[in-house]
Image (spheres, rainbow, N blue to C red):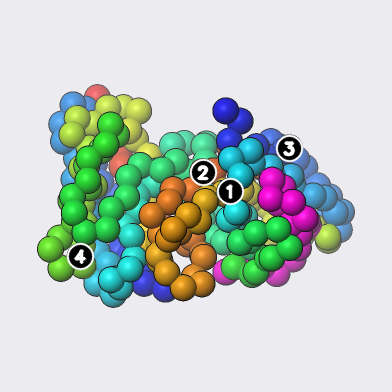
């Protein structure tokens, strides 16, 4: 399985943008890049995903490097509610690899 | 929408006891997963299933068993509880569609299990 590397923790101030990086140098051509987040005492929730092009939704934006070896999750205006662990994972889109595996993620702290 | 429902939310077990953690989803998803999360750690995959009657081991399957007789339900069985199984357990489901890489997974709220 292709691996992802994220910083253990990051800190941001409320209402400022946050850029959460993820490295995935061994990504294959059919791997989708997914981001999930886990709020305290809750199950993970889906944030966004993409394959090659940058993606936007109501929660965040996903910027994918041209060589796809890294990506960045962008929270445009962080709120206190965005304090969570953010996971970057790769989901294989072909064959019989159905696993969905998580790394340790990035703990985002948002300061008032 | 109910989504993924896990029961119970909390449970205390004595060493050697057995129990089943229930997970059901109402989204007609074919993929289902069980994870455990120890304090301050990430999620570890225990077992997963790609459809009724088909299950496979994840990263940490020892001490657990699963079955998948219906699309909706994916129970996790602990036969002889040990203190090392104290953890929070999460169930998840997703749809395969035309390429499972493009579909999102939905998680339950978790079962907090303590073995004493």
The vertical placement of B44 against B75, above or below, is: below
Q: Position of residue A31 (x, y in %)?
A: 34, 65
- Distance from disc 3 to disc 4, alpha carbons, whole Å, reads 41 Å
- Which chain is home to disc 1? B
For residue B107, side relative to residue B115 (left or right): left
Marks 1 and 3 on same chain: yes
Marks 2/1: CA–CA distance: 10 Å
Q: Quadrant of residue B109?
A: top right
Q: Which type of secondary structure does the marked residue at label 4 adopt? A: loop
Residue hosting label 2 = B106
Q: Are marks 4 and 2 in contact (CB under 8 Å)?
A: no
Task: Report the Cα–Cα distance between label 4 and label 2.
Answer: 25 Å
Q: Which residue is mark 4?
A: A68
Secondary structure of the residue carrying numbered label 1: loop
Range drawn in magenta: B59-78
Disc 4: CA contacts within 10 A as few (<14), some (14-19) or many (>=20): many
Q: Which residue is mark 3?
A: B8
Q: Which of disc 3 and disc 2 is earlier in sequence?
A: 3
Give the numbered dot on residue B29: 1
């Amino acid at each position: 399985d292709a691996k992802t590397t994220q910083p253990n923790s990051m800190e941001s101030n409320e209402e400022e943008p946050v850029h959460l990086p993820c490295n995935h140098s061994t990504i294959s051509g059919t791997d989708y890049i997914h981001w999930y987040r886990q709020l305290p005492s809750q199950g993970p929730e889906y944030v966004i995903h993409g394959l090659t092009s940058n993606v936007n939704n109501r929660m965040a934006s996903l910027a994918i490097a041209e060589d796809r070896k890294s990506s960045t999750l962008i929270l445009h205006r962080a709120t206190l509610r965005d304090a969570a662990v953010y996971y970057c994972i790769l989901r294989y889109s072909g064959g019989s690899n159905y696993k969905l595996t998580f790394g340790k993620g990035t703990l985002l702290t948002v300061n008032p | 929408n109910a989504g993924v429902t896990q029961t119970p939310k909390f449970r205390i077990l004595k060493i050697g006891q057995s129990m089943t953690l229930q997970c059901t989803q109402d989204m007609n998803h074919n993929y289902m997963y069980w994870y455990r999360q120890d304090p301050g750690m990430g999620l570890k995959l225990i077992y997963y299933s790609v459809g009724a009657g088909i299950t496979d081991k994840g990263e940490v399957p020892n001490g657990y068993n699963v079955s998948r007789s219906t699309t909706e339900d994916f129970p996790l069985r602990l036969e002889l509880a040990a203190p090392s199984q104290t953890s929070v357990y999460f169930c998840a489901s997703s749809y395969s569609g035309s390429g499972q890489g493009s579909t999102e997974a939905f998680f339950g709220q978790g079962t907090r299990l303590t073995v004493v």
